[in-house]
Image (tube, rainbow, N blue to C red):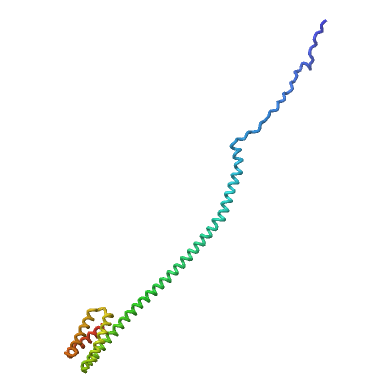
């Protein structure tokens, strides 16, 4: 005789809880950085180094080149100012010297004019003396002395011609002396009159 199956117990009637599934471990791969960012990170230190080198080089160049050049420029400007001041002083001295030279030139010209006037007066005085002595000798009938004085008068008249810028006056005096010598023996009265006129001409010339 077959056995009847037994009814299930309470424990068997309760549902069997399933064991929670253990999640399988997932492999997390590291994040992949972009290539551009990786290159920039590598380049940044070199760029910084180059920039620092440039700044150091610029500072060094400024120290070695700019500062000496600036000092040289300042010295050149100071030298230029000193030279300009010396030049202005020299110009002032030159102007003073030029003024002194002009004054000396004026004094020299005045002295030369006075000397020329003195020489002219001296020559006229000699001529007047020659004519006066010739007249006195002719009145005394000393023809030899009269001729000698007239000869001296010719020499003094030649000197007067060089000193006097009046060729017409000196030519007229030379003609009168010639007339005096011509009439010295032939017409003493005419010779004396010509001597008187010549003496007056010399006096007017001296006071001119």
Residue positioned 75% across, 19% down in the render: 16
**Residue 152: which quarter of the image?**
bottom left
Q: Nearer the viewer, residue 62 or 105?
A: 105
Residue positioned 72% across, 25% down in the render: 22
Left or right of 3: which side holds 78?
A: left
Q: In the rendered view, would you say 111 is above or below 131?
A: above
Q: In the rendered view, would you say 125 is above or below 78?
A: below
Q: Position of residue 11 (x, y in %)?
A: 79, 17
Q: Nearer the viewer, residue 135 or 148?
A: 148
Left or right of 196: which side holds 111?
A: right
Q: Position of residue 1 (x, y in %)?
A: 83, 5
Residue positioned 79% across, 13% down in the render: 8
Q: In the rendered view, would you say 183 is above or below 5?
A: below
What is the quadrant of the C terminus in the image? Answer: bottom left
Residue positioned 22% across, 79% down in the render: 168
Q: Nearer the viewer, residue 190 or 68?
A: 190
**Residue 159: which quarter of the image?**
bottom left
Q: Position of residue 137 (x, y in %)?
A: 23, 92
């Amino acid at each position: 005789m077959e056995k009847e199956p037994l009814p299930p117990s309470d424990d068997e009637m309760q549902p069997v809880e399933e064991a929670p599934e253990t999640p399988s471990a997932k492999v997390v791969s590291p994040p992949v950085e972009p290539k551009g960012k990786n290159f920039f990170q590598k380049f940044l230190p070199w760029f910084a180094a180059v920039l620092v080198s440039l700044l150091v080089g610029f500072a060094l160049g400024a120290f070695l080149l700019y500062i000496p050049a600036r000092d040289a420029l300042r010295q050149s400007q100071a030298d230029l100012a000193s030279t300009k001041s010396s030049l202005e002083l020299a110009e002032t001295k030159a102007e003073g010297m030029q003024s002194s030279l002009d004054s000396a030139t004026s004094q020299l010209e005045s002295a030369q004019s006075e000397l020329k006037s003195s020489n002219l007066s001296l020559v006229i005085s000699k001529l007047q003396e020659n004519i006066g002595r010739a007249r006195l000798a002719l009145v005394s009938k000393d023809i030899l002395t009269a001729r000698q004085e007239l000869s001296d008068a010719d020499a003094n008249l030649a000197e007067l011609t060089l000193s006097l810028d009046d060729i017409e006056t000196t030519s007229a005096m030379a003609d009168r002396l010639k007339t005096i010598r011509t009439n010295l023996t032939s017409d003493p009265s005419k010779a004396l009159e010509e001597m008187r006129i010549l003496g007056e001409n010399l006096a007017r010339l001296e006071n001119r």
